[in-house]
Image: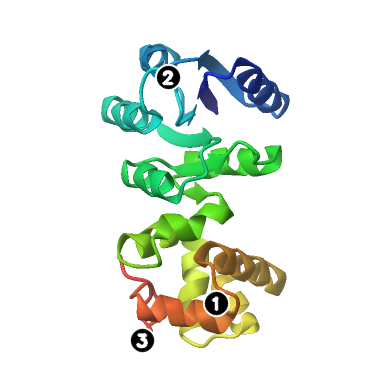
Amino acid sequence: MRVLIVEDQVLFAEAVEFALRSHGIDVVGTASTGEVGLELLPTTNPDVVLLDIGLPDRSGIAIGREMLERCPNVKVLALTALRDGRAAREALRAGFSGYLTKDTDVDRLLRAIESAFSGEVTISKPLARQAAGGRGGDGVSLMVSQLTDRERAVLGLLAAGADSPAMAERLHISKNTVRTHVQSILAKLNVHSRLEAAAFAVRHGVVKIDDGRYPE
């Protein structure tokens, strides 16, 4: 996996680069401004760009949007000190693959990079509800976009009334794996029980209750 870091705080960029390289990720370049990041994009050919929002020359969201326009296959992941649900919502609407704050631990960052590479979306939990805008309209889409395909399948069966053994049998996974998926679903949808998750899914049309599948 190839990663480009766009970050104006040199020490932080170096720390992130060291952490990524220590875990076998190829850091193909670093840039301290958005314009330099754009210049490096075609020559470094990254899979994922870690992009600060508060850059000295231009808005990181504008830079990320331009990167996605120039290279539609690249994944852009915000890594910023800005704890702002509106900024997170704007970034995800621009096509970013996630929005993380700089106090994110290394393991969480690595998982987010892998998720971005796989086409999934990650957002810092404290910002998820703010970014969702009160669960209305686009907010629901933002939360649902964080679910993996397997989590969506589990959610569909959950809404259809299946218990853990039935879900395990249907999906050919262990009951422990079902439990792990359910816990992840609860966290990503900001609900506290299986019943709330099922109600959320049905209320917002995330799944079809008649066949346990979610809408395309």
Q: Position of residue 6 (x, y in %)?
A: 49, 21
- How far is the residue under mark 2 from the one under mark 1? 40 Å
Q: Is residue 216 left or right of residue 33?
A: left
The residue at the point 61 percent across, 43 percent down is 111
The residue at the point 57 percent across, 55 percent down is 125
Quarter the N terminus occupies: top right
Instruction: Give the amino acid type for the residue marked by disc 1 in the picture.
Output: Arg
Give the label, 2 or 1, closer to the camera. 2
Which secondary structure lies at badge 1?
helix
Q: Quadrant of residue 65?
A: top left
Q: Quadrant of residue 137?
A: bottom left
Q: Is residue 192 left or right of residue 90?
A: right
189 to 98, vertically: above or below: below
Q: Which residue is mark 1?
A: 170
Closer-to-camera residue (188/175): 188
Taking the image as drawn, is residue 204 in sight? yes
Instruction: Give the amino acid type for the residue marked by disc 2 in the picture.
Output: Asn
Q: Position of residue 165 (x, y in %)?
A: 65, 82
Instruction: Give the amino acid type for the residue marked by disc 3 in the picture.
Output: Asp
Closer-to-camera residue (1/97): 97
